[in-house]
Image (cartoon, rainbow, N blue to C red):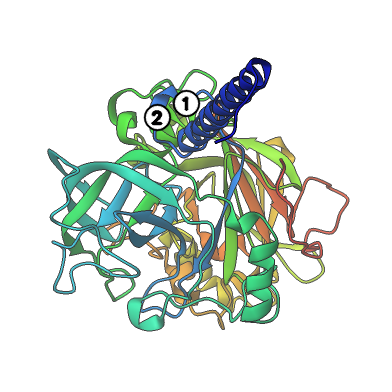
Amino acid sequence: TIHMIPHQKCLLYVSYVLCVLSECLFFFAMMKCACRRRGRRGLFGANLADKIGPVVLPLYHSKGAPNEGVYKARFNVQGKDVDVIVDSASSDLIIVGEECGNGQCQDTAGMYPSNATTFTGEESDVAYGSQSDHLKWAEDDVTFVKMLWERPSLENFGAGFQDVLPGDAESPVGNLQNLLNGAALQQEPKHKLKFGVISSNLSHEVQGGTMPGRSICGIMAFQNSPDKEGFGLLDGEGSNKTSFINQVFGKNGIFKRNVYSMNMEPSGDTGELVLGGLHKGIKHWVPLLKDSEVNPIFQGTPAWFLRIHHVQALDAEGKEMFALNIKQALFDTGNTWLSMPGSVFAEHGHLGQVKGLAGLLITFDNHVRWWFPSSSFGAGSPVSMANATGFGGLAKNMTLPDDMCIIGNECLKGITVAFDIDKGQLGLGGMCINDDKNQPAALCYKWEKPEVQQ
């Protein structure tokens, strides 16, 4: 037994109390930190007090898959990876469900389980250019996957990856070392979203073939207030309640900035989607058309529509061979081709077979010029006939108005396109974008992978 004098006992008690208090403070601090981290990941929904900055998601192009050529990002729901088409001509997130089997739907990475307890009981039907679907709506945590560890295989309709992603080291070992060194180990953000689960699908015939039903992430919304700045895209009313951008941006979202940006490397195999941020190097901004200005056939469609001032067909010396009477463009990242109306084919034939044609120079608002080299639609390209006939990326019984073209993702090689949701305008940058009238029209810059603004 050790005997202590009173002041020693007092000091011992004080030390014990201080130790307990320090442990309590440490525990409280850890809980507070954990709550912040969980809040940032979306567990607190619209009550987020601390929104996050840019999230960079890798994209891969599914070229080589049967009748498919689209850019896909990866989400994770219910512990299952789901690859979604990034589509600027629709508004909702729809995910392939297990019910949509027997070849009706595509199983690129995973399907939403039919026994999930997150279904809301709501059902609806939706039609796209390539598919019509019956949806059962669910509300669940969706994680944005920031690293693709495996390459989707051709057998699963997901070819297109190079052996190494842009910016990675030259070997899997080096790639792993890069991951251990930095940001890729940060938590992947997630947010509770409402989305449609495809329970049955009817595929449309496109260019003589069909694709199974696919998961799609629409990155546009409806113009609920077309005469106001931003067109009411983030008002959360009507059909916009379930739009993807109304759920991840604005008052209910997780990002500080209501912007996003896409960049594709020149090969077209891979790219990046930045949510809540922009790539550097955006040179010009072009306003979207308000809904009343869009061709009546497409009014009420949640999509990017741009005004065109000139479409010039140029030879290798930059001289105009002829002009096309195209006044509007539907910019559709969920579409593969640069599609022209049937009237162009009737007058000029297959553009890719016009002797001496170097490409098309399209001038938009704010004098922004975009050069489309003939390699995008030339006779040797796999989509050449689709570009000429005007049916590229459209369902069999649809036709384009004579004054409209569709700009698809085949044209995005080496290009950055961004969207400012608050202002309703597109940002353009990259190899073949300029507004210098004195610069040779066919000159494209050397491509450099753009950094992301922080």
**Residue type, label 1:** Leu
* Disc 2 from disc 1: Cα separation: 6 Å
Q: Residue at x 74, y 55 (%)?
A: 450
Residue 66 coordinates in the image, percent (x, y): 36, 79
Asked whether, in this view, residue 202 is left or right of residue 207, the answer is left
Picture quarter with the N terminus: top right
Residue 123 coordinates in the image, percent (x, y): 13, 42
Residue 191 coordinates in the image, percent (x, y): 40, 40
Q: Is residue 42 visible?
A: yes
Q: Nearer the viewer, residue 75 or 346?
A: 75
Q: Outermost residue, right direction?
A: 438
Asked whether, in this view, residue 84 is left or right of residue 3, the answer is left
| Discs 2, 1 touching: Cβ within 8 Å | yes
Name the secondary structure under disc 1: loop
Q: Residue at x 46, y 37 (%)?
A: 38
Pointer 1: what residue? 48
Residue 35 coordinates in the image, percent (x, y): 47, 32
| Looking at the image, residue 182 lies above or below residue 424 | below
Number of the label disc, if any, that sits on residue 433: none
Q: Residue at x 13, y 73 (%)?
A: 102
| Looking at the image, residue 401 lies above or below residue 391 | above
Number of the label disc, if any, that sits on residue 44: 2
Asked whether, in this view, residue 396 is left or right of residue 260, the answer is left
Q: Nearer the viewer, residue 352 or 250?
A: 250
Among the 4 quarters of the image, the one containing residue 92 = top left
Q: Nearer the viewer, residue 437 or 278?
A: 278
**Residue type, label 2:** Phe
What is the crowding at mark 1: few (fewer than 14 residues within 10 Å), some, or many (at least 20)? Answer: many
What is the crowding at mark 2: few (fewer than 14 residues within 10 Å), some, or many (at least 20)? Answer: some
Q: How many marks?
A: 2
Among the 4 quarters of the image, the one containing residue 169 = bottom right
Name the secondary structure under disc 2: loop
